[in-house]
Image: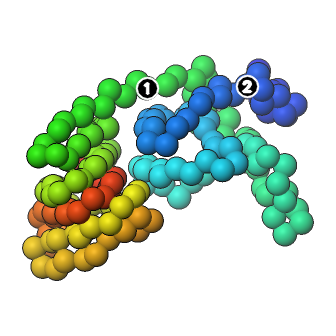
Amino acid sequence: EELKKKIEENDWKDLLVYEDIHPGDYTFNPPGLIHGLEADDVMCEVQQSSDTTYRIYDYDRLFDGKPRQLHVKQALEVTSVPSSKTEVHAVKEENNGNTIIHYIDNEFFKITRYQVKNEVTGKNPKYSLLVVFDGNGILETEHESYPIHAGMGIVVTSLSSEYTIKGDVDVLSSETGF
């Protein structure tokens, strides 16, 4: 009831926990955690397969001159109260001048960041989604080579059991759970 009341009163200052974020930060939000971004923040969100997003607040923005639809009732049904944050203990490894950061590996997905200075090879058991954060390089699969650069999103399909990233490039990889 307290959560519903604060939402109805637009009491976001007392309802939400604001966290400072910095380029390169990683956070894990478990299902049921209310989360959002402020202006000028950019993120790469990896999530379980879902077509559902419940909006409880939209910064009073207008879309085609009207407020966007909110989903307060539905959100209240799935929101964890009190909220809890899952601590993530990334494992960082240095390998031949490259930095590999293993953020999470659970039954739903695996997220790894490759800060490549020369070359690194990743396994591809089902398929991998790659997002190039910074730099330029080459993505090689068993079948092809592709130039890659900041801003690209790439799907490495199940036709390749591994891939190699070469160059000076920063890439986030996500894979489905096993």
- Looking at this view, is 154 or 97 the one in front? 97
Q: Position of residue 50 (x, y in %)?
A: 48, 55
Of all residues, the one furthest to the bottom in this rendering is 144
Mark 1 residue element: loop
Q: Amino acid at mark 2?
A: Leu
Q: How is the protein colored in the picture? A: rainbow
Corner quadrant of residue 146? bottom left
x and y percentages locating residue 69 in the rendered image: 78, 55
Q: In the image, which disc is placed on residue 15? A: 2
152 or 124, which is in the foreground? 152
The crowd level at tag 2 (other Cα within 10 Å; few <14, some 14-19, many 20+) is few
42 displayed left or right of 49: right
User: What's the residue at 52%, 38% (across, down)?
Assistant: 22
Asked if residue 155 shows in the view, the reply is no
Q: Is residue 176 left or right of residue 123?
A: right
Visible residue check, residue 90? yes
Distance between mark 1 and mark 2 Cα atoms: 19 Å
| Residue 20, percent from left and from top | 59, 31
> Measuring 44% from the left and 49% from the top, which residue is drawn there?
47
What residue does disc 1 label? Answer: 86
- Label 1 vs 2, first from the N-terminus: 2
Name the foreground residue: 131 vs 11.
131
Residue 79 to residue 95: above or below: above
Q: Estimate how packed mark 1 is, as few (under 14), some (14 to 19) or many (20 or more) residues with alpha carbons within 10 Å.
A: few
Give above or below for 82 relative to 117: above
Q: Is residue 174 left or right of residue 31?
A: left
Q: Is residue 68 above or below residue 39?
A: below
How many badges with numbers are in the image?
Answer: 2
- Going 16% across and 79% down the picture, which residue do you hit? 144
